[in-house]
Image: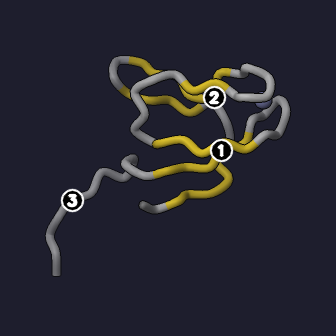
Amino acid sequence: MANTRKNPRSKFLRIVCPRCKKQKTVFGKATTLVKCEGCNYLLLQTKGGKSKIRAPIKEVLWK
Ligand SMILES: [Zn+2]
């Protein structure tokens, strides 16, 4: 068995814009701001090097 600790945030997430319901795939450890392509809503915010997702997560995509 592999004994590697994986960061739970190092995965891709499919989030839904709470404003216009447009879906977007983001990296959980993103270090840059992510805005909705449809309405410019701020989906992912960064604070102190950590990312904060401001939209509901619809699906977790392992990669
Ligand atoms: Zn939107």
Q: Name the quadrant of the N terminus.
A: bottom left
Q: Name the quadrant of the C terminus.
A: bottom left
**Above/below status of 27 relative to 12:** above
Q: Amino acid at mark 3?
A: Arg
The reply to whether callout 2 and callout 1 are in contact (CB within 8 Å) is: yes
**Above/below status of 43 relative to 28:** above
Q: How many marks?
A: 3
The x and y percentages for residue 6 are: 27, 57
Pointer 3 or 2: first along the chain: 3
SS at badge 1: strand
Q: CA distance from mark 1 to mark 3?
A: 25 Å
Task: Write down the residue under mark 3.
Answer: 5
In this view, the residue in front, 47 or 32, is 32
Q: Locate residue 11 relative to residue 48 in the image: left or right.
A: right
Q: Nearer the viewer, mark 1 or mark 3?
A: 1
Q: Residue at x 40, y 27 (%)?
A: 31
Q: Locate residue 44 relative to residue 46 in the image: left or right.
A: right
Pointer 2 or 1: first along the chain: 1
Q: Residues within 10 Å of mark 2 (few under 14, many from 20)?
A: many
Q: Residues within 10 Å of mark 1 (few under 14, many from 20)?
A: many
Q: Locate residue 19 relative to residue 27 in the image: left or right.
A: right
Q: Is mark 2 within 8 Å of ligand 1?
A: yes
Rendering colour mode = secondary structure
Q: Amino acid at mark 1?
A: Ile
Q: Locate residue 44 relative to residue 23 in the image: left or right.
A: left
Q: Residue at x 55, y 57 (%)?
A: 60
Q: Quadrant of residue 41?
A: top right
What label sits on residue 15 in the rendered view? 1
Task: Write down the residue under mark 2.
Answer: 43
Q: Residue at x 82, y 39 (%)?
A: 21
Q: CA distance from mark 3 to mark 2?
A: 28 Å
